Image (spheres, grey):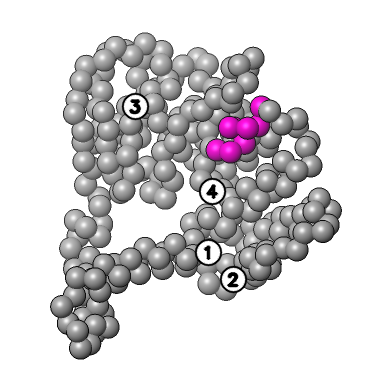
Amino acid sequence: MLPLLIGDLIPEGDEYFSLILILLEIMDIVFAPSVSIEQTIILEDLINQMYSRFHSLFPLTRPINKFHHMAHYPAAIRTYGPAVGYWCMRYEAYHNSCKRVAHINCNFINIPKSVAYHLQTISCHNLLTNDLFHDDIPTVGPRSKKNLVNRQEDSITDGNSSLNLDSNATVIRWVKFKGWHYRPGTVILLKHSFENLSGYPEFVLETITFNRHFHAFELQPYFPAKSIMIAHDNLRPNVAPTWLLKSFNVSENVSYVTVRYFV
């Protein structure tokens, strides 16, 4: 998101901005829920590029210890799997429940035992309760009638499908499925980059190219326009729906979409 906010003010090829872009490419792999061995090799090269670029731009600055931690990311991913599964935010989210129970606990003799019992009870309940642990039933929002004429950017999602329609249709304000909210106007991933010969991911709009300066994919409506129907159980479970964005450069009329990690 940052490149789209300030990228129009920075010339392409700026050496300081390129350091930020390298860090974003590192994050695309580190935060991915699925990482291949080949990507860990690319990650090693990106981290080396980041080290070299940082030392050349800031020769008198001493890096913090987290810079050294990045050197171990590729080996850790190859040994333990994607880093997003064991990053510190996972621990902090789980630890927050411990702190809340400790504040309201009335056991003043053995608080750790009460906290551990409470967390184990929650874990067992989540595992045994299908509705909480497996959110496979879509939740549908309010419905309304709308005339959609050649508006492929409107992604209409109901309980059974995700549609791009060209005429009158019943529009649902939102659908919640497996933790994600799908709304009209959102862009949905259809195919991953490794599933296409072009090497680009496929969305409900046509992918033109990847703009490295804005760190985003350039999209445009299909011509001729076409409708796309997706059953809700075929939606990518680990990929959040995103929105079409514009840069602040008023002279260009290009739509961009940013993703949280490598797709």
- CA distance separating discs 3 and 1: 32 Å
Q: Nearer the viewer, residue 203 or 124?
A: 124
Mark 1 and mark 2 residues within 8 Å of each other at the beta carbon: yes
Disc number for residue 83: 1
The residue type indicated by label 4 comes to Tyr
Q: Are marks 3 and 1 in contact (CB under 8 Å)?
A: no
Residue 261 numbered mark, or none: 4
In this rendering, position of residue 227 left or right of residue 136: right
| C-beta proximity under 8 Å, tags 1 and 4 | no
**Residue at screen point 26% across, 23% down:** 171
Badge 1 or badge 4: first in the primary sequence: 1
The residue carrying pointer 3 sits among few (fewer than 14), some (14 to 19) or many (20 or more) residues within 10 Å by Cα, namely some
Q: Earlier in the sequence, mark 2 or mark 4?
A: 2
- Looking at marks 2 and 3 on the same chain, the residue that comes earlier in the sequence is marked by 2
Is residue 119 visible in this depiction of the protein?
no
Q: Secondary structure at mark 1?
A: helix
Label 1 crowding class (10 Å Cα cut-off): few <14, some 14-19, many 20+?
many
Residue 163 percent across, percent down from the top left: 34, 27
Residue holding disc 2: 76
Which residue is painted at 27% across and 41% down in the image? 176
Say which label, 4 or 3, has the lower sequence index. 3
Identify residue for label 3: 184
Label 2 neighbour load within 10 Å: few <14, some 14-19, many 20+: some
Name the residue: 58% across, 50% down.
28
| Element carrying mark 4 | loop
